[in-house]
Image (cartoon, rainbow, N blue to C red):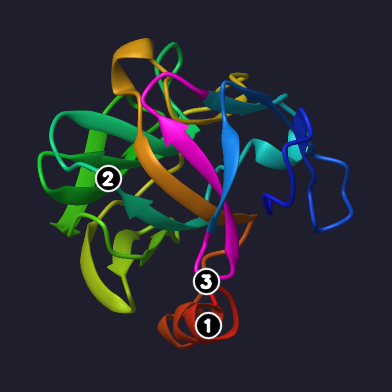
């Protein structure tokens, strides 16, 4: 999804019609990049659809520029009643978290920097989960399948105490686990300009 204007929706650039509804989210031009500007209270919600029910493989990615690093801040995902997967910024670290079908919650993280664009990617391949920040990975074992969730996809403020403050430029979701080389290529061919 790309933010292009102050219209009430964010258009799914893939052409699959998974448009999101903006609530208290403006657009901001940041050096030629038009991004969604979140103030800790706004959110974007994309209604659930079968394509978002990942089980054994997935990738979620976002270009983000956080204004602050404290507390939990939801970047993108399906989390909280019931949980499945999420990119999160919390207390100075980017996290990729998943809930397995057996209710085991797992996460992996890397350091975050405020007021600087970062490409954050979470990858799950059925045996391992990884988070990449600007192409640098951290990984851990995560065998099994993901917990299913009929929640909508949320950017920021879900739950309400997880409000994100900063910019989000572009988000992407895949029903496959991108390889390290594919994550690098995604970083090189997308993002703020």
* Residue position for label 2: 67
**Residue 163 appears in which quarter of the rendering?**
top left
| 26 with respect to 11 (left or right) | left
Residue 32 higher or lower than 39, as above or below: below
Question: Closest to the observer: 75 or 42?
Answer: 42
Q: Which label belongs to residue 131?
A: none
Q: Are marks 2 and 1 in contact (CB under 8 Å)?
A: no
CA gap, disc 3 and disc 2: 16 Å
Tag 3, which secondary structure?
loop
Tag 1, which secondary structure?
helix
Residue at the image point whose x is 89% and y is 55% from the top:
15
Residue at the image point whose x is 59% and y is 84% from the top:
189
Mark 2 nearby-residue class (10 Å; few <14, some 14–19, many ≥20): some
CA gap, disc 3 and disc 1: 18 Å
**Residue 27 appears in which quarter of the rendering?**
top right
Q: Earlier in the sequence, mark 3 or mark 2?
A: 2
Total of numbered circles in the picture? 3
| 16 with respect to 160 (left or right) | right
Question: Closest to the observer: 77 or 27?
Answer: 27
Q: In the image, is residue 81 part of the stretch drawn in magenta? A: no
> The magenta stretch spans which residues?
30-42
| 138 with respect to 118 (left or right) | left
Q: Which label belongs to residue 182?
A: 1
Image location (x, y in percent) of residue 52: 66, 38
Q: Are marks 3 and 1 in contact (CB under 8 Å)?
A: no
Mark 1 nearby-residue class (10 Å; few <14, some 14–19, many ≥20): few
Q: Are marks 3 and 2 in contact (CB under 8 Å)?
A: no
Image location (x, y in percent) of residue 179: 47, 79
Residue at the image point whose x is 40% and y is 55% from the top:
64
Query: Quarter holding the C terminus?
Result: bottom right
Image location (x, y in percent) of residue 114: 20, 54
* Residue position for label 3: 192
């Amino acid at each position: 999804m790309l933010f292009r204007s102050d219209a009430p929706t964010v258009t799914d650039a893939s052409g699959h019609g998974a448009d999101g509804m903006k609530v208290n989210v403006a657009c901001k031009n940041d050096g030629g990049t038009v991004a969604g500007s979140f103030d800790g209270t706004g959110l974007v919600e994309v209604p659930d659809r079968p394509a978002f029910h990942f089980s054994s493989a997935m990738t979620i990615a976002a270009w983000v520029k956080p204004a602050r690093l404290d507390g939990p801040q939801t970047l993108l995902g399906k989390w909280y009643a019931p949980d499945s997967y999420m990119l999160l910024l919390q207390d100075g670290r980017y996290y990729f978290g998943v809930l397995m079908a057996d209710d085991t919650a797992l996460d992996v993280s890397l350091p975050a920097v405020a007021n600087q664009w970062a490409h954050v990617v979470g990858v799950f391949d059925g045996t391992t989960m990884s988070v990449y920040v600007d192409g640098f990975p951290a990984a851990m074992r995560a065998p099994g399948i993901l917990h299913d969730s009929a929640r909508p996809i949320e950017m920021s403020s879900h739950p309400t105490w997880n409000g994100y403050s900063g910019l989000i430029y572009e988000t992407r979701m895949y029903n496959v686990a991108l390889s390290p080389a594919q994550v690098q290529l995604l970083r090189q061919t997308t993002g703020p300009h």
